[in-house]
Image (cartoon, rainbow, N blue to C red):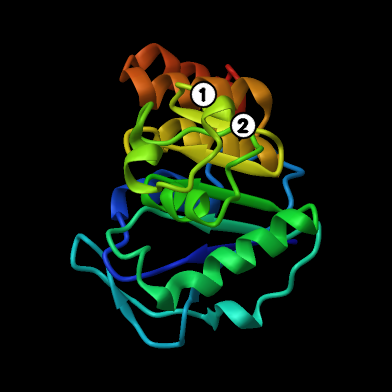
Amino acid sequence: MKTVYVFILETLADWELGHVLAELNSRRFFKPDAPEIQLMRVGATDEPVVSMGGTKMTPDVAIGDITVDENTFLLLPGADTWSDPMYAPAIAKAEEVLTAGGTVAAICGATVALAAAGLLDSRPHTSNGEGFLEMFVPTYRGAAYFEDAEAVSDGELITAGATGAIAWTRRIIERLGVMDEAALQSWFDYFSTGDARHFFSLWESVNGSGT
């Protein structure tokens, strides 16, 4: 079993987590021998938070209670509140995860928090466009490692901008190894283009052409 920790905080951007949580929870396109995935909501405390869309979410555990090793997987969604000092422990935990060889996947506002902690200064990454991190983080020194792409992975670190949730999800699923390559490609093509041909390719990849 693999545990994927999802950090939840006030004003988190619901849509950025939508695709990845749906696929990891439903397993609808997983390969037969995919490992079990346990999703755990993690908070700064054990108190509920309210998302940008108005959904109340309650943490399963607090950030200080999660186990960190090379198998730890931590998702950091975007939010308007990452600058609040109460969320600093989540970024400290992200650094701990990366140091241990685990995986951190951050999107949108979470990349700003990582940049402010210096965690993007020497790793390939992306965010909400070129110049965005410099605008919000005067101490950011990672411009040489910035890539103008929807999502970027250097293995342990996966980043994306606000409009890159589908590409971000693809990188996360790829890292977890729970879908066949052909199925994942068809999934990405379908949800990024809306072309029904890719849905049928996805269906065949998972169920076989005779189904």
Quadrant housing residue 84: bottom left
Counting from the top left corner in percent of width and height, residue 146 is at 52, 28
The kind of secondary structure element at disc 2 is loop
- How far, Cα to Cα, is label 2 from label 1? 7 Å
Counting from the top left corner in percent of width and height, residue 112 is at 42, 49
Give the residue number, with chain letter if any, for mark 2. Answer: 124
Quadrant housing residue 59: bottom left
Q: Is residue 157 above or below residue 130?
A: below
Q: Is residue 186 above or below residue 129?
A: above
Check the image and name the residue furthest to the front. Answer: 138
Sequence order check, earlier mark of 2 and 1: 2
Within 10 angstroms of label 1, few (less than 14), some, or many (20 or more) residues? some
Give the amino acid type for the residue marked by disc 2 in the picture.
Pro
Question: What residue appears at the point 63 percent right and 68 percent down from the top-left corner?
Answer: 93
Within 10 angstroms of label 2, few (less than 14), some, or many (20 or more) residues? some
Give the residue number, with chain letter if any, for mark 1. Answer: 147
The kind of secondary structure element at disc 1 is loop
Quadrant of the rendering where the N terminus is positioned: bottom right
Check whether the beta carbons of the residues at disc 2 and disc 1 lie within 8 A of each other: yes
Residue 10 makes an appearance in the image? yes
Front residue (pair 12, 58): 12
Question: What residue appears at the point 50 percent right and 48 percent down from the top-left corner?
Answer: 115
